[in-house]
Image (cartoon, rainbow, N blue to C red):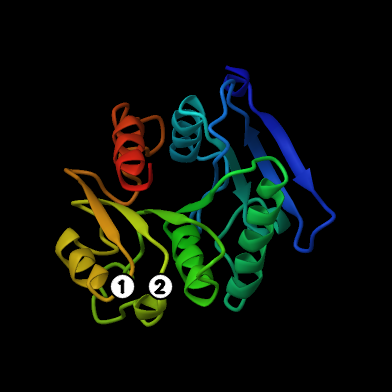
Amino acid sequence: MESETFKAFLDDSLEPAVRGWLHTPVTPNNDGLVLTHGAGSSANSPLLIALAEAFAQHGYGVLRCDLPFRQERRFGPPFPGNAERDRAGLRNAVAALRKNVSGRIFLGGHSYGGRQATMLCASEPELVSGLLLLSYPLHPPRRPEQLRVQHLPDLRTPSLFVHGTRDPFGSVEEIEKALRLIPAKTELIGVEGAGHDLGFKGKARAPDLPAGIMARFEAMFG
């Protein structure tokens, strides 16, 4: 597979620019997936790499990209007020990937990246064919009253959520309740014993998780 050696990707004709890594499958199914990261990570997170490889093995062209805030500085979370620019970066990543695949485009994100993806699609329901949301940050740790659900009733994009049973940003039960606010089709994969990192913290790996997500994704969107 060509994408076992993925290649750097840059489209600076867009503003914000799109920067990341492109996985090109040997036998394309003509569909594509944009993947992005959380507030403390980058496109090179082990979770995103593992998922990109799994999807590429099943024929998807995958662009895992750095959000604009991460392009501007290598470390640290996004500054308050930067979220709209990060959403614009996601919109541009979708446009950039459309130049490389002819079929459907999906959008996926871990934590902050996933939340921005849902907010973008709530306002632009035709942007992508579906969402893959990894560890959606439902509320800050130990602050369950500060729910981040205001836009969910406007989300009409089919969405697959993946959530650890030990995630401090929301329990599986809280996520299930939040999903009832979404008018689109939703499904939830609960990952037993996993925290916000879904078992990909440091050198740790959850080797069966990408294949499990891939199988559920294909069943939902295939």
Circles 1, 2 touching at the beta carbon (< 8 Å): yes
Q: Amino acid at mark 1?
A: Ile
In this rendering, does residue 69 appear at all? no
Reading the image, the residue beneath label 1 is 182
Please say if 193 is above or below 163. Answer: above
Judge from the rendering whether residue 222 lies leftward or rightward of residue 163; answer left or right. right
Q: CA distance from mark 1 to mark 2?
A: 6 Å
State the residue at coordinates (63%, 19%).
2
* Quarter of the view holding residue 72: bottom right
Q: Amino acid at mark 2?
A: Leu
State the residue at coordinates (57%, 20%).
4
Reading the image, the residue beneath label 2 is 155
- Label whose residue precedes the other's in the sequence (1 or 2): 2
Looking at this view, is 16 or 193 the one in front? Answer: 16
* Quarter of the view holding residue 114: bottom left
In this rendering, does residue 7 appear at all? yes
